[in-house]
Image (tube, rainbow, N blue to C red):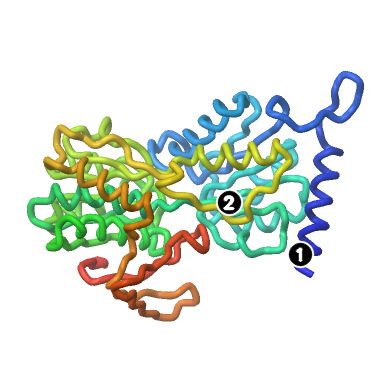
């Protein structure tokens, strides 16, 4: 029955696309192409954060350049909160004639799922979520990238730079996406420095420069001499520079914001997905229900290493680990590994990964699933 429903929705979408296309001079429906496609983008912030949302805008612009799509064909809904305002923004984009709509924050998924059934001719793509991957709608999709691979590599820079083996991490929320990321970062640092430990502080917001700076300072006061982050602004970088310590960023190169502190950043190259999704739609293909690519596909990467302050040999160590990740001979969550975490249903769970095994993050679903706290990491209250 699920396949039948999906097929019917797909057929409905095909006919609807033909019906709602732009009219040419003769009054006939024009085929969808790069000159007439309309794209909607719903963002939790705006590109001024120089972090998460900025990185998404870079991805959209890369897609535009690759496919020849003009600025006026893109409609942004920036600074959209994770509440009913998101539903309003999505509906406005649908009514504005968008053929495909992207939403970039975890809390947008329920609102997208609410609107999507009413517009089967429009493709709805949601970053960082998990529900669309398994629903019965042919026009909803999830997308993310194997950022844990890049975070692991960035962790190498931290592990080689620290002078007291005490790392700190400014984390947004206690979600699997965030926990997976800071665990990968720590494991990367530990791969080159077995003595490192790491403290984590949650801000409980995706983007709040004041809280991020406060969390960074609290970690510095605890003695951390390298700070990393899963938060949207450059506040941890500038706080680290003021304190005379070092920082590893996320989403964008933060060296310009803190040239004496920022070592390197892990980032998702969203342009890989945006180009894929829009091109697939233009080519009449089916966008993957759940999409996740990693370092080997160019979907995640590192910004250039700040060689002025990085430890000697850092680039060589990163390159060696990256080659093994690309070849599939090194896995981020490789055993032996033990952890305790809170499952998605609220229950406490433990995990034990054997020495000859690994946790296959990103291989079965795009949404991160590692939510366990391992030895060496302390979450501060």
The residue labelled by disc 1 is 3
Image quadrant assignment for residue 133: bottom right
Residue 253 - label: none
Q: Residues within 10 Å of mark 2 (few under 14, many from 20)?
A: many
297 and 65: which is toward the camera: 297
Q: Quadrant of the image for the N terminus?
A: bottom right
Above or below, comparing residue 203 to residue 245 in the picture: below
Measured in 3D between alpha carbons, the distance from the residue under mark 2 to the one under mark 1, in whole angstroms, is: 22 Å
Above or below, comparing residue 183 to residue 57 in the picture: below
Q: Position of residue 136 (x, y in %)?
A: 71, 63
Q: Position of residue 125 (x, y in %)?
A: 61, 49
Q: What element does badge 2 sit on?
A: strand
Q: N-terminal of the two: label 2 or label 1?
A: 1
For the point 16% across and 53% down, the residue is 220
Look at the image and tell me whether residue 346 can be seen.
Answer: yes
**Dots 2, 1 in contact, CB < 8 A:** no
Image quadrant assignment for residue 262: top left
Q: Residues within 10 Å of mark 1 (few under 14, many from 20)?
A: few
Query: 302 left or right of 278?
Result: left
Look at the image and tell me whether residue 211 can be seen.
Answer: no
Count of labels in the image: 2
Above or below, comparing residue 331 to residue 350 in the picture: above
Q: Position of residue 195 (x, y in %)?
A: 12, 63
The residue labelled by disc 2 is 126
Q: Quadrant of the image for the C terminus?
A: bottom left
Query: 186 left or right of 137?
Result: left
Q: What element does badge 1 sit on?
A: helix
Image quadrant assignment for residue 23: top right
Q: Give the foreground label among 2 and 1.
A: 1
341 and 77: which is toward the camera: 341
For the point 37% across and 42% down, the residue is 301
């Amino acid at each position: 029955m699920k396949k039948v429903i999906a097929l019917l929705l797909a057929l409905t979408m095909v006919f609807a696309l033909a019906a709602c296309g732009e009219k040419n001079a003769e009054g006939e429906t024009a085929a969808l192409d790069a000159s007439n496609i309309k794209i909607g983008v719903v963002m939790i912030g705006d590109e001024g954060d120089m972090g998460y949302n900025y990185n998404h805008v870079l991805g959209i612009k890369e897609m535009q350049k690759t496919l020849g799509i003009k600025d006026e064909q893109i409609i942004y809904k920036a600074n959209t909160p994770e509440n009913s305002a998101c539903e309003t923004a999505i509906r406005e984009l649908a009514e504005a004639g968008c053929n495909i709509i992207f939403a970039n924050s975890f809390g947008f998924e329920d609102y997208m799922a609410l609107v999507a059934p009413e517009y089967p001719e429009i493709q709805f793509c949601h970053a960082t979520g998990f529900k669309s991957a398994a629903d019965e709608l042919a026009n909803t999709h999830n997308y993310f990238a194997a950022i844990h691979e890049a975070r692991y590599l960035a962790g190498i820079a931290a592990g080689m730079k620290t002078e007291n083996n005490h790392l700190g991490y400014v984390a947004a929320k206690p979600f699997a996406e965030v926990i997976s990321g800071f665990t990968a970062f720590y494991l990367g640092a530990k791969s080159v420095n077995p003595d490192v430990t790491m403290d984590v502080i949650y801000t409980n917001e995706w983007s709040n420069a004041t809280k991020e700076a406060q969390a960074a300072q609290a970690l510095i006061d605890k003695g951390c001499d390298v700070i990393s982050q899963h938060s949207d602004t450059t506040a941890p970088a500038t706080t680290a520079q003021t304190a005379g310590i070092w920082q590893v960023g996320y989403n964008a190169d933060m060296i310009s914001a803190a040239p004496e502190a920022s070592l390197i950043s892990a980032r998702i190259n969203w342009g890989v997905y945006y180009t894929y999704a829009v091109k697939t739609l233009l080519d009449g293909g089916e966008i993957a229900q759940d999409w996740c690519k990693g370092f080997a596909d160019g979907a995640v990467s590192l910004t250039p290493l700040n060689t002025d302050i990085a430890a000697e040999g850092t680039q060589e160590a990163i390159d060696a680990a990256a080659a093994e990740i690309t070849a599939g001979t090194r896995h981020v969550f490789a055993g032996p590994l033990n952890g305790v975490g809170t499952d998605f249903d609220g229950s406490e769970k433990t995990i034990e990964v054997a020495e000859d095994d690994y946790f296959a993050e990103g291989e079965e679903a795009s949404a991160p699933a590692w939510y366990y706290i391992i030895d060496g990491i302390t979450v501060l209250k």
